[in-house]
Every structure is written in C-alpha cells, then in structure tokens.
Image: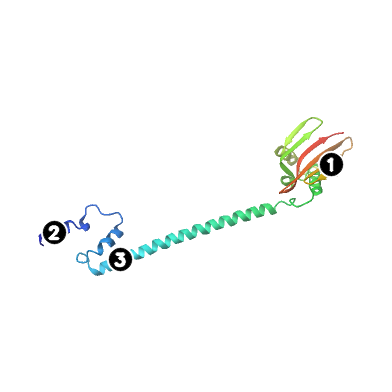
Amino acid sequence: MNKQTESCIAHSPIFSPQLPRNAGAWSNRYSVNLHNAIPLKYQIRNRKNNIYSTLKTTDMKTTLKTTWRTIAAALIMVTSLSSFAAEKANPLKNVESDMIIGSYVDAVTVGSIDLNKFLFADDFQYNNVNNNDRAGKKEYIKHLKANKGMQYDCKSSYQILSQDGKVCVAKATMAFNNFTRVDYITLNQGKDGWKVSKVETTYP
C-alpha cells in the first residue's frame, strides 16, 4: 500500500471516529463515490434497501394522515348525530302552549316527572305569594321529583288568559276539599319551543 492510498483511507468517511446518526443515509450517500472500496453488488443492495425504507416511511406517513382524517370524520359524525339525537329527544319542542300547561299541571298534581327537564326555562322562577317562598329551576324540579307518583286529591283545570306572540299567561286551578290553589303560569317561546318561565302560586 503506497502513501497516497494510506492518505485516502485516513481521510475517508468510513474510518471517521464519529459516524453520522443516520447510518443508512450516510452509507447510501458515500457508496456512490466508493466503487473501489465497496463491491458493486453491495452498493446496489444498499441502494435498494434505502429506497425500500423511504417508500415504507412514506407509506406510513400517508397511512397516519388517512387514519387521522378518518378519526376526525368519525368524531364530526358522532357529534352531529348526538346533536340530532338531543334535538329529537325533546318531545315538547314543537307542541302548542296548552300542551305545556297541561304537562305542568300533571307534574304538580299527579307527580309525573318524565317531561320536567323539557318544561322549564333555564331562568325559571317560582314564587309562593302567600308565604313568599321562592325557588329556581333546580330547586323546583327537585321538589317535583321528591313528589314523584304522588297524586293530589283535587280537581284540576287550566285556561289560557292571554297569548301574544311568544308570550303566554295561563291560570291553573287545583280545588281541594278545604282550599284552592291557583298557579299563574308564564310561558315564553324560544328555539326549543314553549317553556315555563315563571309560576306564582296563590291560595285565595
């Protein structure tokens, strides 16, 4: 081996004490210029392996992108279906105001609570005029739930006093043996239909 050959080997990247991290890319990079140092069949095989690895990596990236797109589409579909189901689950959304009033009277007099979550507006207010008791939506629904299935011994009736546009005022009468309870009910119509927004109870 002459000095010129020794000098080439000493400065060759193959004998570098610190090799690049990507050994595959490095070997492919220098195999083109090292025909004499590496046999041709190994150069070809390494090049084929490098191309195969590149294609495999590209396929994996494409698969991941496709998978994420599929998951995103599935989530959008589930959200849409959930919203649609929630909308269809409200049986009182498209009914007239008198149906809402009748459902309210049933909740009070016979303990029917199945439709309570659809009956009342979020800002619902209850007021007992005689003793000044007050309650919001959560407290009043809790009170009705505590009386689930309890039927009052009374004759009940209701009538619409006025309805103008999206506001309705009704009167519900519950006649017991010794007293009468009268509820004045205010309803408002919104995107979710008619809702009971206010009830004032009196004992005339």
Query: What amino acid does circle 2 point to?
Result: Glu
Does residue 83 appear to the left or right of 63 in the view shown? right
Give how far apart the Cα atoms at labels 1 and 2 are. Answer: 109 Å
Pick whichever, 151 or 131, lies toward us: 131
The answer to which of marks 2 and 3 sits earlier in the sequence is: 2
Residue 84 in percent (x, y) is at 66, 55
Q: Point out residue 137 in the picture as x, y percentages from the top left corner.
A: 71, 39
The answer to which quarter of the image holds residue 44 is bottom left
- Residue 7 horizontal/vertical position (percent): 14, 58
Q: Residue at x 12, y 60 (%)?
A: 4
Q: Nearer the viewer, residue 7 or 67?
A: 7
Ranked by sequence position, the earlier of labels 1 and 2 is 2
- Image depth: mark 1 or mark 2 in front: 2
Residue holding disc 2: 6
The residue shown at (67%, 52%) is: 86
Q: Quadrant of the N terminus?
A: bottom left
Q: CA distance from mark 2 to mark 3?
A: 27 Å
Q: Earlier in the sequence, mark 3 or mark 1?
A: 3
Mark 3 lies on residue: 47
Whether the residues at callouts 2 and 3 have beta carbons within 8 Å, the answer is: no
Q: Residues within 10 Å of mark 1 (few under 14, many from 20)?
A: many
Q: Assign a secondary structure to mark 2.
A: helix
Which secondary structure, mark 1?
strand
Q: Residues within 10 Å of mark 3 (few under 14, many from 20)?
A: some
Q: Is 111 above or below relative to 60?
A: above
Pointer 1 residue: 172
